[in-house]
Amino acid sequence: MASSRRVFLMTVAAGGAALSTGVRAQSMLEEGDPTALSLGYKADTTQVNAKKFPKHAASQNCSNCALYQGKAGNPSGNCAIFGTKQVAATGWCSAWAQKS
Protein backbone atom coordinates (compact mmCIF):
# COMPACT_ATOMS: atom_id res chain seq x y z
CA MET A 1 0.00 0.00 0.00
CA ALA A 2 2.78 2.42 0.88
CA SER A 3 4.41 1.76 -2.50
CA SER A 4 1.16 2.58 -4.33
CA ARG A 5 0.80 5.81 -2.38
CA ARG A 6 4.43 6.71 -3.08
CA VAL A 7 4.00 6.06 -6.83
CA PHE A 8 0.80 8.10 -6.88
CA LEU A 9 2.38 11.07 -5.08
CA MET A 10 5.48 11.03 -7.29
CA THR A 11 3.33 10.80 -10.41
CA VAL A 12 1.15 13.73 -9.34
CA ALA A 13 4.17 15.86 -8.42
CA ALA A 14 6.02 15.08 -11.63
CA GLY A 15 2.91 15.57 -13.74
CA GLY A 16 2.32 18.98 -12.22
CA ALA A 17 5.91 19.98 -12.86
CA ALA A 18 5.70 18.82 -16.46
CA LEU A 19 2.49 20.77 -17.05
CA SER A 20 3.92 23.93 -15.56
CA THR A 21 6.93 23.89 -17.91
CA GLY A 22 4.81 23.89 -21.06
CA VAL A 23 5.24 21.79 -24.18
CA ARG A 24 8.83 21.23 -25.32
CA ALA A 25 10.71 18.84 -27.51
CA GLN A 26 11.54 15.77 -25.49
CA SER A 27 15.16 14.74 -25.12
CA MET A 28 16.81 11.74 -23.55
CA LEU A 29 17.74 11.90 -19.89
CA GLU A 30 21.50 12.03 -19.41
CA GLU A 31 23.01 9.99 -16.59
CA GLY A 32 24.85 13.14 -15.47
CA ASP A 33 21.61 15.11 -14.99
CA PRO A 34 21.35 16.21 -11.31
CA THR A 35 18.01 14.43 -10.76
CA ALA A 36 19.29 11.32 -12.55
CA LEU A 37 22.41 11.32 -10.36
CA SER A 38 20.38 11.69 -7.17
CA LEU A 39 18.27 8.65 -8.11
CA GLY A 40 21.14 6.55 -9.46
CA TYR A 41 19.70 6.47 -13.00
CA LYS A 42 21.52 4.29 -15.50
CA ALA A 43 20.41 3.88 -19.12
CA ASP A 44 21.40 0.20 -18.84
CA THR A 45 20.10 -1.66 -15.78
CA THR A 46 23.10 -4.01 -15.87
CA GLN A 47 25.37 -1.03 -15.04
CA VAL A 48 23.72 -0.23 -11.68
CA ASN A 49 26.10 -0.18 -8.70
CA ALA A 50 24.98 -3.20 -6.65
CA LYS A 51 26.75 -2.00 -3.50
CA LYS A 52 25.09 1.40 -3.61
CA PHE A 53 21.67 -0.01 -4.59
CA PRO A 54 21.39 -3.47 -2.97
CA LYS A 55 17.64 -3.70 -3.62
CA HIS A 56 18.19 -3.49 -7.40
CA ALA A 57 17.48 -6.69 -9.32
CA ALA A 58 18.62 -7.42 -12.87
CA SER A 59 14.99 -7.96 -13.90
CA GLN A 60 14.07 -4.38 -12.95
CA ASN A 61 14.12 -1.81 -15.74
CA CYS A 62 12.23 1.31 -16.75
CA SER A 63 9.90 -0.55 -19.11
CA ASN A 64 8.49 -2.64 -16.23
CA CYS A 65 8.27 0.25 -13.75
CA ALA A 66 4.94 1.75 -12.68
CA LEU A 67 6.29 5.25 -13.42
CA TYR A 68 7.27 4.49 -17.03
CA GLN A 69 4.88 5.96 -19.58
CA GLY A 70 6.41 4.63 -22.80
CA LYS A 71 4.74 2.09 -25.05
CA ALA A 72 5.73 -1.56 -24.86
CA GLY A 73 8.53 -2.35 -27.29
CA ASN A 74 9.74 1.26 -27.68
CA PRO A 75 13.42 1.87 -26.87
CA SER A 76 12.54 4.86 -24.68
CA GLY A 77 9.61 6.68 -23.14
CA ASN A 78 8.52 9.30 -20.65
CA CYS A 79 8.84 8.81 -16.93
CA ALA A 80 6.70 10.53 -14.30
CA ILE A 81 9.83 11.30 -12.28
CA PHE A 82 11.85 13.05 -14.97
CA GLY A 83 9.22 15.38 -16.49
CA THR A 84 9.89 16.07 -20.16
CA LYS A 85 13.00 13.87 -20.42
CA GLN A 86 12.76 10.40 -21.88
CA VAL A 87 14.40 7.41 -20.24
CA ALA A 88 15.77 4.25 -21.83
CA ALA A 89 13.38 1.30 -21.58
CA THR A 90 16.39 -0.74 -20.45
CA GLY A 91 17.31 1.84 -17.79
CA TRP A 92 16.78 1.89 -14.03
CA CYS A 93 16.67 4.34 -11.09
CA SER A 94 16.06 3.98 -7.37
CA ALA A 95 12.45 5.19 -7.77
CA TRP A 96 11.65 1.95 -9.60
CA ALA A 97 8.28 0.53 -8.50
CA GLN A 98 6.70 -2.73 -9.68
CA LYS A 99 3.86 -2.31 -12.19
CA SER A 100 0.64 -3.71 -10.86
Image (spheres, rainbow, N blue to C red):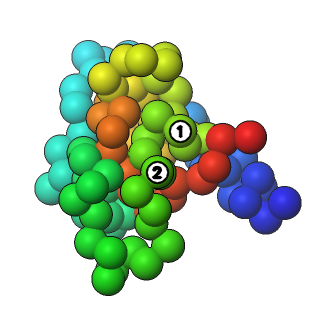
Judge whether 85 appears above or below 98 on screen.
above
Q: Amino acid at mark 1?
A: Asn
Q: Position of residue 63 (x, y in %)?
A: 46, 34
Quarter where residue 93 is shown: bottom left
Would you call the spot at circle 2 few (<14 residues within 10 Å), some (14-19), or many (20 or more)?
A: few
Residue 54 visible somewhere in the drawing:
yes
**Figure label count:** 2
Residue under label 1: 64
Real-space CA distance between mark 1 and mark 2, rounded to the nearest whole angstrom: 9 Å
Which residue is painted at 31% across and 52% down in the image? 45
Of labels 1 and 2, earlier in sequence is 2
Q: Amino acid at mark 2?
A: Ser
SS for dot 2 = loop
Q: Which of 91/15 is in front? A: 91
Residue under label 2: 59
Judge whether 100 appears above or below 27 on screen.
below
Judge whether 65 appears above or below 1 on screen.
above
In the orientation shown, which residue stands out farthest toward the right? 1
